[in-house]
Image: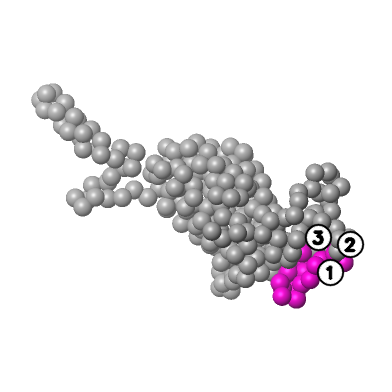
Amino acid sequence: MREFPQPRKRPRQARSAQTVELILEATAQLLAERGYACMTTNMVAERAGVSVGSVYQYFPNKSSLVAALHERHAIQMRNAIEQCVAARSSDLEHSIEAIVRAMMAEHESAPALHQVLEQEFRFFDTPIADSPADTQILCCLRTLLEKHQHEIAAIDFDLAAWTLLQVAQSLVHAAVIDPPWQFASDEIERSIVRIILGFLRYTPVDRAGDTVHPFLGDRRQDAMTAAGQLRAEAS
């Protein structure tokens, strides 16, 4: 099993939390400016305005700093997505648009940093199952899909939420880290939204050419047979 670098300890007081935030922000700036190889904990301490001892008090090495940045990003994404879902839009499309827009904005705020995090150091990104923030994002998306279940074809909300998150993250990362020069940001956003809605609303067709609604499953034929019997009795 792969082990992921962890902080030495978590801040428990407001002042300690502020120190950790200064350290992480300094790490983010230096990663974007210099890259991982050229960054040192001494540089982080100097940029953050704290002692090297303060850095090591919370983070044992550079790897744990990068892992903490990944988790901070996940928390920021969770907060943004929760706000979109809490808006209680009556329309699924508007909710998906808001989520994609929020994800794009979050990544566009620091594209150089995300390029380093996603292209060079994905190894330090904690798996969804071990990340409380990512787990909460999935629960939030599942709640959204359950609320709008009359608008979608998916019946497995857990799988649909996971797929939605993976598709959105992959496309947003691609759009921000290696942006195509020929497309505007809003065009890419609309394209991502259409892809997600297409997946959620996709209804397969069986070999006979009949639509198979996932909510009915094997009961579709039973319903059709019962309807035929009623018509026969009525005639």
> In the picture provided, is 197 more to the left or to the right than 206?
right
Residue at numbered disc 1 = 42
Residue at 33% across, 42% down: 214
According to the image, label 2 marks what residue?
Answer: 51
| For the residues bearing labels 2 and 1, Cβ distance under 8 angstroms | no
Label 1 sits on a secondary structure element that is: helix
Distance between mark 2 and mark 1 Cα atoms: 8 Å
Check disc 2 and report its element: helix, strand or loop: loop
Q: Which residue does the image show at 53% across and 61% down from the upper left?
A: 170
Place of residue 143 in the rendered image (x, y in percent of width and height, measured from the top left) = 53, 38
Say which amino acid is labelled 1: Asn
Return the x and y of residue 108 as percentages of the image width and height. 67, 62
- The residue mark sitting in front, 3 or 2, is 3
In front: 64, or 172? 64
Give 38 or 89, whichever is nearer the viewer.
38
Q: Could you say where residue 22 lies in the image, as x and y percent from the top left?
A: 82, 57
What number is the disc on residue 216? none
Q: Earlier in the sequence, mark 3 or mark 1?
A: 1
Q: CA distance from mark 3 to mark 2?
A: 9 Å
Q: Is residue 141 magenta?
A: no
**Which SS does the magenta portion mostly show?**
helix
Q: Quadrant of the C terminus?
A: top left
Above or below, 94 against 42 in this view is above
The stretch in magenta equals 27-48
- Which disc number belongs to residue 56? 3
Residue at position x 55%, y 49% in the image: 129
Total labels: the figure holds 3
Task: Say which quarter of the image contains residue 26.
Answer: bottom right
